[in-house]
Image (spheres, rainbow, N blue to C red):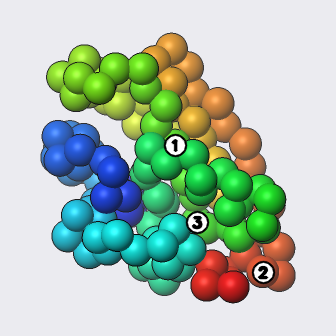
Amino acid sequence: MRLLADENIEREFVEALRELGHDVAWGQDVHRQWPDTEVLQLAVTEHRVLVTADKDFGELVYARGLAPIGIILLRLSSDDMTANLPILRRAMPELARLGEGHFAVVTDTRIRVRPLRVSPRSHGAGA
């Protein structure tokens, strides 16, 4: 899967995603401190699913109608990356199987998935 890891995603997660075979661009390298709308636009332009820990992307997608390729929102209780890596490794095969067009929330114990609704404004992330 082609992913854009937001700048708030730890390097260990990015490396683990790459080890799992995903093509990952990382915000620390390509979009430091960009507004969320510009991050979404980059994900659309590069045809990548956004991986983030920032809940504001839910508001952009559902309240403002901006639809990226897909979003994986990490809502993990621990700040310990070592503890969270097994959760990520368990979640990614299911998320990859679902493919694009979904808003997925990954918690310590489950994955919640909602389809993204594509609207005429779907790729207007800069709007």
Instruction: Please tell me whether mark 2 sits on a helix, a strand or a loop.
Output: loop
Residue at 66%, 37% in the rendered image: 113
Residue 19 shows which numbered tag?
Answer: none
Q: Quadrant of residue 65?
A: bottom right
Q: Which residue is mark 1?
A: 73
Residue 121 shows which numbered tag?
Answer: 2
**Of discs 1 and 3, which sits in the foreground?**
1
Q: Is residue 94 above or below residue 58?
A: above
Q: Is residue 80 visible?
A: yes
> Tags 1 and 2 in contact by the CB under 8 Å rule?
no
Residue 109 located left or right of residue 61: left
Crowding around mark 3 (Cα neighbors within 10 Å: few <14, some 14 to 19, many 20+) is many
Residue 90 located left or right of residue 112: left
Residue at 59%, 56% in the rendered image: 57
- Residue 115 point in image, percent of width and height: 74, 49
Q: Is residue 118 above or below residue 75?
A: below
Measured in 3D between alpha carbons, the distance from the residue under mark 2 to the one under mark 3, in whole angstroms, is 13 Å
Residue at 83%, 81% in the rendered image: 120
Q: Which residue is mark 3?
A: 69
- Residue 67 point in image, percent of width and height: 69, 67
Measured in 3D between alpha carbons, the distance from the residue under mark 1 to the one under mark 3, in whole angstroms, is 13 Å
Residue 54 located left or right of residue 105: left
- Residue 51 point in image, percent of width and height: 43, 51
- Residue 108 point in image, percent of width and height: 46, 18
Q: Quadrant of residue 26?
A: bottom left
Q: Quadrant of the N terminus?
A: bottom left
Instruction: Please tell me whether mark 1 sits on a helix, a strand or a loop.
Output: strand
Residue at 30%, 65% in the rendered image: 27
Q: Is residue 101 above or below residue 54?
A: below
Crowding around mark 1 (Cα neighbors within 10 Å: few <14, some 14 to 19, many 20+) is many
**Of discs 2 and 3, which sits in the foreground?**
2
